[in-house]
Image (cartoon, rainbow, N blue to C red):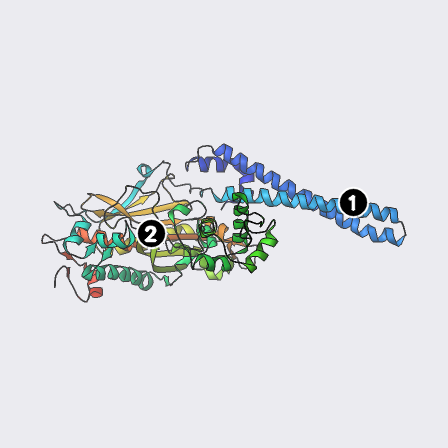
Amino acid sequence: MHDIRAIRENPQVYVAGWSSRGVEDADGLVADILRLDGELRRAQTTGQDALAKRNAASKLIGAAMGKKDMAEADRLKAEVEALKGDIAAAAEVEARVGKELRDLLAAQKNLAAEDVPDGEDEAGNVEVGAWGEPRRMGPAKDHADLGEALGMLDFEAAAKMSGARFAVLKGQLARLERAVGQFMLDMQTDQHGYLEVNPPYLVRDEAMFGTGQLPKFADDLFGAQAGSSSAMLKTATLNGVREAFQEWKRSGWLVTPNQDDPEGLGVAAYDIEEFFEYLEISPRLPDPIFDEVLLDKPQRWLIPTAEVSLTNLVRESILSEDDLATPMRMTALTPCFRAEAGSAGRDTRGLIRQHQFSKVEMVSIARPEDSDAEHERMTACAEAVLKALELPFRRMLLCKGDMGFSAQKTFDLEVWLPSQGTYREISSCSNCGDFQARRMDARFKRAGEKKTEFVHTLNGSGLAVGRTLVAIMENYQQDDGRIAVPAALQPYMGGLQFVGGQ
């Protein structure tokens, strides 16, 4: 989220910043924001002035009546009534324009840090480091072929029950995937000082909004509903029922009972209060309409990454400076769920891009002056996993056009995949500055200070389990089709040295 005061004071900074992040008409965008800001402030001023005048007039009514000046009292009463209308009108404008301004600001990307390179897409990313010697074996088998040949990776069975972009892992390969996740979680907690957290996998709209997934990226998420239509009706939120009422009214379904509709299933309701009364009497509603209106909005969202759950642990809170003397560091190993709406045709085979996968996530909460150093530390913690597994990788500084929505600076780690003869992303570590904190209202107070400041939030993969498994399978493949188990993972595998062996 962006600070409207900062935009007001330095509009050209935002014009330049958003232009560099792909906004085509940043001048027009900033002009719209400032126009709405002006309208909002004028409505607020109008409402405050009318309220002050009403209060003053109300006090004078008693004085006039005390003097038995009924004409003056009546005039003041009429003035109060008129001012009430002015106050209500100003409040309506304030609510409407305020929402429009908030929605517009919420849809805009974070500004990039000064040292982030220009660029429109991944071609503008800059390699800033590398480790290990890429293994160029020929011919290198793809991880999907390796797993299927071992009888331990089954895409067909997964597709029958869940569709594309799902997989079933079996036997030693399933154990290897479990070992990868446990090893990474242990490394981040035991060696790097992250606090292990077991967070919810289902979250509300507010949590997704806080980290920037909503409202812009709803199509990339999986939603979840609970219960049937009738159960949903009984537990629907006030706003949900209001939305349903308006939709049914627009659709023409809300009609008065008549001889052709003796039970009144058309709903004898012209306003929302009567509608609520009707629901108490008869919950019978047409399922198709009900499903389209109420059930198209999930009750909960499945997390696309534990970043959502971990970062929201500090939402709507005020930390002390002592709480952040050392950055707050948390980690979790969770399943993640992504619709991959924007990846049609990409990585359709194998484990690279799945709807469901596991990931060890790292999240840090820091003071503004500590976040750059924490970003470097977090990225090094992710690199340590790849080094321990002896997987060649490189570090990329993402350009402005390739960074995520909430990030102000991002390092991607890309691991070497022999079958593709190239590096592929396995971790993304981002400093979001105060962007997410503003959306979550996560603040801290310095010792001796009255005012509060927004914290800085950082997140990174430490690492994506499925992609790490892919890298192990391909880099450790043997001529006989087996897969060697990296030395660091053998204690997690009961001493097993090869997948596909005894």
Say whether residue 414 is visible: yes
**Mark 1 residue crowding within 10 angstroms, few (<14) / some (14–19) / many (20+):** some
Q: Position of residue 450 (x, y in %)?
A: 58, 57
**Mark 2 residue crowding within 10 angstroms, few (<14) / some (14–19) / many (20+):** many
At horizontal 51% and vertical 44% (from top left) the residue drawn is 251
Q: Which residue lies furthest to the front in this view?
A: 259
The residue identified by callout 2 is 379
Q: What element carries label 2?
A: helix
Q: Position of residue 226 (x, y in %)?
A: 42, 59
In the image shown, does 101 or 356 lie closer to the viewer?
356
Q: What residue type is labelled 1?
A: Glu
The residue identified by callout 1 is 79
Q: Where is residue 141 in the image (x, y as percent from the top left)?
A: 15, 48
For the residues labelled 2 and 1, say whether their Cβ atoms are less than 8 Å apart: no
Say whether residue 450 is visible: no
322 on left or right of 422: right
The C terminus - image quarter: bottom left
**Against 94, is 441 above or below?**
below
Q: Which amino acid does label 2 sit on?
A: Thr
Q: Is mark 1 on a helix, strand or loop?
A: helix
Q: Residue furthest bottom?
A: 494
> Mark 2, mark 1: which one is toward the viewer?
1
